[in-house]
């Protein structure tokens, strides 16, 4: 090599380390993919290690059914309106807990999806350079949702809305802690750290009792309300991210805005938020992945009224008992094995892989920019 670190030995070392780390991360996925293509006969055949004797696509057929991917969301919407036509809406309102009924749960989900269009059109103007395309892009995005598998849509619904609520509240709290001085600020930080290090299973029972008394247990409000109040999954971590980012914004910008007659809220909306795009990218990317994979708390608070794909993964064995054809004469392939589990697991991570593939460049740039003070 040479002194400027661009010699042949340096390049060989870089490529060797890159390939090694890539192998460590990609090998389990590749292994799962190859096993998911095998039949039970191939799994017990010692001569077959990687390449199956034939592609056993029934594993993915089962995965699609078990994870509620054999029905499009538009079909579910049509079924709900048929139920409303049969009088299910009146029965829902007469129920002791109307928000937990199937009809109102689905109508709330539909309302949230349709509200994406005006929300993006209004608030997207703070960040978008070409504001004229916001309505078109949001409309296309909502239209695509209607033609996605139901399992993916429910998972997007739970993970997406919870993440957005958590990120919004975290940005507000982080900005307040970074730009304002008040008594008890140190105590607030101490409580944030304490909540962060406490096990999440420690507080779920008393919270569940409170939500039950409020009548929101079993509904999405049991996830939205704590998220909007800065108590969502990993909210403390996001608050610290926004605190660090907002703290680095030059005070001269804020002082100039005050001289021009802007209020603190105006500065937050028109100056701080557009400058905090890197922090939003980091928080939303990580938060969405965490909420997507969250099973324990979501299942406890939602009581099965909305089932995400990670929740359904836990019931693959039971679902296989309803899917398998025990009268087919193929006694070997009716047993539940890791090939079925791997097929379902791979289907469950497809949205996360696609998301990371799309925003990885922005994610890396955001991490890099989050360390620039601008001064």
Image (spheres, rainbow, N blue to C red):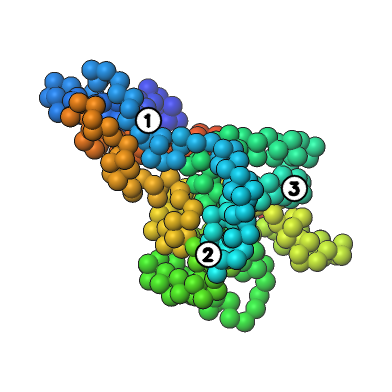
User: Residue 285's x, y, as percent?
Assistant: 53, 47
Local crowd size for mark 3, using a 10 Å CA cut-off: few (<14), some (14–19), many (≥20) = some
Kindly state the secondary structure of the residue where label 2 is placed.
Answer: helix
Local crowd size for mark 1, using a 10 Å CA cut-off: few (<14), some (14–19), many (≥20) = some
Query: How many marks on residues?
Result: 3
Tell me if I can see residue 137 in this picture: yes
User: Residue 29's x, y, as percent?
Assistant: 33, 33
Residue at the disc numbered 1: 61
Residue found at the far right of this picture: 260
Residue found at the far left of this picture: 46
Q: Of the two numbered discs 1 and 2 on the same chain, state the one appearing first in sequence.
A: 1
Residue found at the far front of this picture: 86
Can you tell which mark lies on residue 198? Answer: none
Can you tell which mark lies on residue 222? Answer: 2
Local crowd size for mark 2, using a 10 Å CA cut-off: few (<14), some (14–19), many (≥20) = many
The answer to whether 118 is drawn above or below residue 57 in the figure is below
Which residue is rendered at x = 40% and y = 54% of the image?
A: 295
Kindly state the secondary structure of the residue where label 1 is placed.
Answer: helix
Measure the C-alpha gap from mark 1 to mark 2.
34 Å
Q: Of circles 3 and 1, which is in front?
A: 1
Q: Of the two numbered discs 2 and 3 on the same chain, state the one appearing first in sequence.
A: 3
Tell me if I can see residue 364 in this picture: no
The answer to whether 322 is drawn above or below residue 296 in the figure is above
Front-most of residues 309 and 25: 309
């Amino acid at each position: 090599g040479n002194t400027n670190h661009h010699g042949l030995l340096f390049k060989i070392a870089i490529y060797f380390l890159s390939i090694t780390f890539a192998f460590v991360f990609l090998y389990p996925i590749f292994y799962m993919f190859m096993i998911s293509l095998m039949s039970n006969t191939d799994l017990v055949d010692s001569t077959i290690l990687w390449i199956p004797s034939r592609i056993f696509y029934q594993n993915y057929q089962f995965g699609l059914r078990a994870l509620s991917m054999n029905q499009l969301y538009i079909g579910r919407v049509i079924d709900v309106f048929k139920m409303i036509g049969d009088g299910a809406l009146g029965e829902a309102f007469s129920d002791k807990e109307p928000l937990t009924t199937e009809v109102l749960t689905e109508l709330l989900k539909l309302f949230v999806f349709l509200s994406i269009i005006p929300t993006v059109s209004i608030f997207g103007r703070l960040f978008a350079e070409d504001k004229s395309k916001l309505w078109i892009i949001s409309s296309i995005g909502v239209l695509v949702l209607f033609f996605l598998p139901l399992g993916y849509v429910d998972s997007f619904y739970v993970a997406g809305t919870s993440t957005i609520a958590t990120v919004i509240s975290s940005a507000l709290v982080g900005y307040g802690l970074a730009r304002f001085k008040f008594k008890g600020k140190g105590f607030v930080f101490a409580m944030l750290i304490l909540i962060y290090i406490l096990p999440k299973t420690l507080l779920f029972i008393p919270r569940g009792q409170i939500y039950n008394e409020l009548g929101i247990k079993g509904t999405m409000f049991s996830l939205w309300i704590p998220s909007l109040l800065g108590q969502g999954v990993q909210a403390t971590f996001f608050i610290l991210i926004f605190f660090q980012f907002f703290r680095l914004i030059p005070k001269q910008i804020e002082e100039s805005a005050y001289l021009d007659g802007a209020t603190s809220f105006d500065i937050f909306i028109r100056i701080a938020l557009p400058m905090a795009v890197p922090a939003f990218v980091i928080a939303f990317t990580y938060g969405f992945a965490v909420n997507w994979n969250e099973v324990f708390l979501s299942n406890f608070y939602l009581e099965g009224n909305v089932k995400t794909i990670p929740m359904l993964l836990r019931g693959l064995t039971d679902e296989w008992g309803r899917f398998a054809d025990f009268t087919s004469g193929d006694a070997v392939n009716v047993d539940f094995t890791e090939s079925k589990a791997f097929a379902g697991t791979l289907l469950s991570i497809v949205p996360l892989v696609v998301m990371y593939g799309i925003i990885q460049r922005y994610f890396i740039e955001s991490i890099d920019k989050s360390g620039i003070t601008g001064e």
